[in-house]
Image (cartoon, rainbow, N blue to C red):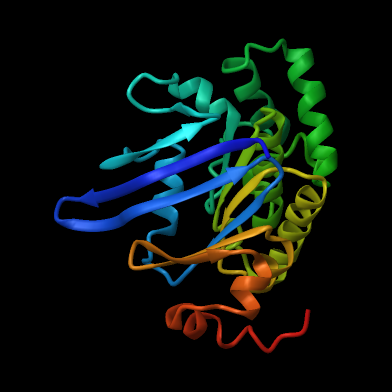
C-alpha cells in the first residue's frame, strides 16, 4: 500500500499543559481514517499539528517519507497536497462561492483563471453547490457553506483531505447533507483523515479508527474491531451507547 502520511512519536505541549503524547499512526492511499474521542482528548490539536497550523513539540510528520518540518519540504507545497476542511468553514465572506474555490488554485497552484474556474465548477457540481456560484457565504446555510469548503479543498487536487469536526458547527438538520458528500468521497476512494463526533458515520465509512483519550492513542484498528470488539475499558466505555446499534 502507498503510504501518504506517517506520524511518528508526535507530542505537543502548550506551556506546562501536555496536549498530545507520543502519537504514532499511518495513513495509506485510499484510507478513511477517523479520529474519535471525548472533547479535550487532543483530536483537533493533532490535526492542526499534521497540517502545520501548530508546530509539534517533538516527533515528526512525514509525507511520502519526507519530513515536512525543518526544511524537509516547503510548507506551502505540503499544504497544497494536504487539504483542510475546518468546523467553522473559513470561507472568505467578501468573495463569491466561485471565487472562494478559485483563489487558492490561482495563488498557490498558479493556474489561469479559466483553468481555476473549470476545476472549481467541477467540484461545486460534485457537492451540489453549482447553482450558488454567485452567492456570498453570508447568504448560505451552514451546510451549504461546509459543502463549498469541501469543494474548495477538492479543487486544489490534494492527496489527502483533513476534516476537523466538519459537522459540529451545523444545526442537526444540516448535518446529513455534509455527511452524504463525505460518504460519496469515501466511496470514490478519496484519502481522508476525519476528526468527528458522528459515531455511526465513523463506524460506517472508516477503514481505520483511532480512539484518543487524554492526548494519547488509547486504541486503534479497523472499524469492526473498534466498534464491535474494543479491547480497552476506556474505548468500551466511550462506545457503550453505540455498540448495540445494528449495522
Compared across the picture, whether 142 is left or right of 36 comes to right
Q: Could you say where residue 110 lies in the image, as x and y percent from the top left? A: 63, 11
Residue 209, located in which quarter of the rendered image?
Answer: bottom right
Residue at the location (81% across, 52% down)?
187
223 vs 69: above or below: below
Residue 93 in view here: no
128 vs 203: above or below: above
Q: Could you say where residue 166 lies in the image, as x and y percent from the top left? A: 59, 56
Q: Could you say where residue 136 lies in the image, as x and y percent from the top left? A: 66, 39
Q: Residue furthest left?
A: 16
Residue toward you, 189 or 89: 189
Residue at the location (62% across, 69% down)?
198
Position of the N terminus, as image quadrant, is: top right
Residue toward you, 207 or 148: 207
Residue toward you, 233 or 150: 233
Residue toward you, 135 or 150: 150
Position of the C terminus, as image quadrant, is: bottom right
Residue at the location (66% across, 28% down)?
156
Compared across the picture, whether 235 is left or right of 150 comes to left
Compared across the picture, whether 177 is left or right of 60 comes to right
Residue at the location (68% across, 73% down)?
200
How many marks can you see? 0
210 vs 148: above or below: below
Compared across the picture, whether 71 is left or right of 133 comes to left
Q: Could you say where residue 14 lies in the image, as x and y percent from the top left? A: 21, 50
Amino acid at each position: 500500500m502507498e503510504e501518504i502520511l506517517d506520524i511518528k512519536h508526535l507530542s505537543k505541549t502548550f506551556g506546562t499543559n501536555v496536549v498530545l503524547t507520543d502519537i504514532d499512526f499511518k495513513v495509506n492511499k485510499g484510507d478513511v481514517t477517523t479520529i474519535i474521542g471525548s472533547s479535550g482528548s487532543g483530536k483537533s490539536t493533532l490535526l492542526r499539528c499534521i497540517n502545520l497550523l501548530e508546530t509539534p513539540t517533538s516527533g515528526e510528520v512525514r509525507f511520502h517519507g519526507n519530513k515536512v518540518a525543518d526544511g524537509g519540504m516547503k510548507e506551502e507545497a505540503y499544504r497544497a497536497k494536504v487539504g483542510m476542511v475546518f468546523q467553522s468553514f473559513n470561507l472568505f465572506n467578501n468573495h463569491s462561492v466561485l471565487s472562494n474555490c478559485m483563489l487558492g488554485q490561482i495563488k498557490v497552484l498558479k493556474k489561469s483563471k479559466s483553468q481555476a474556474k473549470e476545476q472549481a465548477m467541477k467540484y461545486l457540481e460534485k457537492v451540489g453547490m453549482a447553482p450558488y456560484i454567485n452567492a456570498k457565504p453570508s447568504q448560505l446555510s451552514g451546510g451549504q457553506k461546509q459543502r463549498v469548503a469541501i469543494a474548495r479543498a477538492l479543487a486544489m487536487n490534494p492527496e489527502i483531505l483533513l476534516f476537523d469536526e466538519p459537522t459540529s458547527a451545523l444545526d442537526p438538520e444540516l448535518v446529513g447533507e455534509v455527511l452524504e458528500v463525505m460518504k460519496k468521497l469515501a466511496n470514490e476512494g478519496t484519502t481522508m483523515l476525519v476528526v468527528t463526533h458522528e459515531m455511526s458515520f465513523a463506524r460506517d465509512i472508516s477503514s481505520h479508527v483511532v480512539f484518543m483519550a487524554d492526548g494519547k492513542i488509547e486504541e486503534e484498528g479497523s472499524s469492526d474491531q473498534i466498534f464491535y470488539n474494543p479491547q480497552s475499558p476506556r474505548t468500551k466505555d466511550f462506545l457503550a451507547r453505540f455498540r448495540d446499534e445494528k449495522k
